[in-house]
Amino acid sequence: SFKRHTMFNPPGKQQREGMDRQTMKIADRQERLDQLIRNYRVRGHILASLDPLGKQRATPPELMPEFYDFSERDYDRVFSTSTFGGPKQRTLREMIQWLRNTYCRSIGAQFMHIDSLRVRKWLQNRMESTANFLKFERPESLRILRRLTDAVVFEEFIQKKYVGLKSFSLEGAESLIPLLDLAIEKAGEQGVDEIVFGMAHRGRLNVLTNIMGKKPREIFREYEDSVPEMCVGRGDVKYHLGYSSDWMTETGHNVHLTLCFNPSHLEFVNPVAMGRMRAKQDRWANIDRTKGMVLLIHGDAAFAGEGVVQESLNLSELRGYRTGGTIHVIVNNQIGFTTDPAQSRSSTYATDVAKMLQIPIFHVNGEDPEAVAQVVRLA
């Protein structure tokens, strides 16, 4: 029999209603996936494998698919991922794995507090299109290995040769040396002619030898008290001394390096290093601030605890003080002299004070030197 059609029951009405319901279901699932993606961008760093001791934090519920009513049967559905770097379509299973690889491996990224949409999208594209991992060519990997070996051998020699003497060892954070090596190379590629460094005691002797080019025998002489000036009250302890040298990059660009002398007062060198670079830029008439760079190395407890850090950050974007950008490297050995992190700061990370500026913050597991190198490339 034929079904009667009227203006209230036109042909195809039920079919269109069925299609509308199906479209709404697809749109609803897509919206839930977009919420999951956003929360990984905001909170994924919490699940990142940052602790060399393997301690893991509890998974926030908003990073779990079940929080968005996804079930096992949804895992092989295909979704649009046009707002995410890489392929424009993926299954939910593939998407979750890609999100975890991008934001929850050895690199944790905090960047969603940045107001600039352009900057956020640039960072998202750079990280998400590669899952925050770029394969290194063999020569690059060998260079990282050589730098790590240099750092380890230097520390082991001092520990064996000068037993019981202060060295403020870099042990456990040796990946700082390949980090600085790559930072100088990348800065040279971008036309930087001079870098001013500021750092405290931790790892300073290693940096002096393996980055600044100070001869190891000069440092060993200072250990053996064979410097006459030190015996009559002149000079300074070896882990306060500065140094200058020239670095020829692999592309043939000469970069002048200056390591500022350091006082015993932690972080007080920061405004000195920034002021030196600003003075040099003014002397060069380098209005766009591209010929020089400041690289500051901090301890985790001091960065969170010393007021001069916040004061320097506050000045850094003002017209009369800006230097075109400073790279801050925080060496976190999880103990501030004798205090563990839970007793030394009220924030989750030592870096939380830096969120006062519109800058990205990267947390990296120091036991993964290639992840460290990847962050340097981003920075």
Image (cartoon, grey):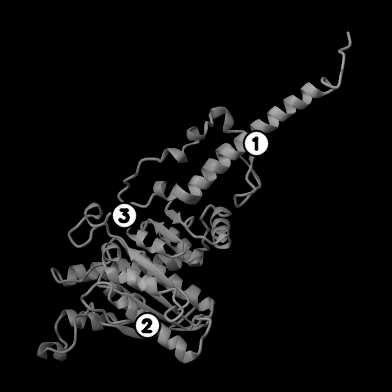
Please tell me which residue is depicted at 35% across the width and 62% down the height of the picture.
353
Mark nearer the N terminus (1 vs 3): 1
Q: Amino acid at mark 1?
A: Ala
Q: Position of residue 27 (x, y in %)?
A: 65, 36
Q: Which residue lies most toward the front here?
A: 7
CA gap, disc 1 and disc 3: 38 Å
Q: Secondary structure at mark 3?
A: loop
Point 38% across, 71% down: residue? 314
Task: Check disc 2 and report its element: helix, strand or loop.
Answer: helix
Q: Position of residue 361 (x, y in %)?
A: 43, 60
Q: CA distance from mark 1 to mark 2?
A: 54 Å
For label 1, the crowd category at 10 Å Cα-Cα, with few meaning under 14, some 14 to 19 and many 20 or more, is few
Q: Name the residue at 14% across, 71% down.
A: 165
Residue 147: tell me if it is visible: no
Measure the alpha-carbon separation of dots 2 and 3.
29 Å
Answer with left or right where residue 305 lies relative to residue 91: left
Mark drawn on residue 275: 2
Q: Earlier in the sequence, mark 2 or mark 3?
A: 2
Q: Which residue is mark 3?
A: 347
Q: Residues within 10 Å of mark 3 (few under 14, many from 20)?
A: few
Which of these two is toward me, 202 or 44? 44
| Amino acid type indicated by mark 2 | Gly
Q: Where is residue 294 shown, x and y percent of the image? A: 41, 77
Give the quadrant of the N terminus.
top right
